[in-house]
Image (cartoon, rainbow, N blue to C red):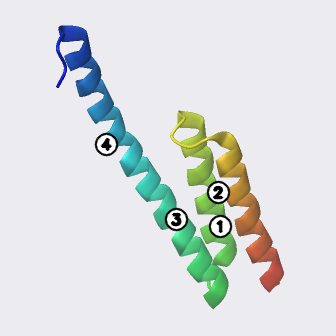
Amino acid sequence: MPNNAAAKKRMRQEQKRRLHNRSIKSLVRTQVTKARTSITTGENAEEAVRNAVSELDRAAKKGVIHRNNAARRKSRLMKQLNATK
């Protein structure tokens, strides 16, 4: 437990930030999963990949995930998309 006011405030801030980051990561994972399933089924694959790339860029811009992590995931998605064509 925090012993001073600054530590208590830091805990409150971390908790808010953790919840915010978790929701963004969840959104990213959902879009990536949708993109992968649409690649395998072949329905609206390009649009789903575009949405996933957009979410990855947004999360990287906000600092929720590292920009290289986003780039790696985008690269893998594009590779899967182009392999099916």
Q: Are marks 2 and 1 in contact (CB under 8 Å)?
A: yes
Query: What amino acid is labelled 1 in the image?
Result: Val
Q: State whether residue 30 is above or below residue 22.
A: below
Residue linked to disc 4: 19
Question: Badge 2, how many Cα within 10 Å: few under 14, some, many 20+?
Answer: many
Q: Residue at x 29, y 25 (%)?
A: 13
Q: Amino acid at mark 2?
A: Val
User: Of helix, strand and loop, which one carries label 2?
Assistant: helix
Left or right placement of residue 84 versus residue 62 in this view: right
Identify the residue position indicated by label 2 in the image: 53
**Badge 1 density bin: few <14, some 14–19, many ≥20, Cα 10 Å:** many
Label at residue 31: 3
Position of residue 38 relative to residue 15, above or below, is: below
Residue underneath mark 1: 49
Q: Is residue 55 found left or right of 22 in the rendered image?
A: right
Q: Is label 4 in a helix, a strand or a loop? A: helix
Residue 11, located in which quarter of the rendered image? top left
Can residue 42 be seen here? The reply is: no
Amino acid at pointer 3: Gln
Q: CA distance from mark 3 to mark 2?
A: 9 Å
> Which marked residue is nearer to the observer: mark 3 or mark 4?
4
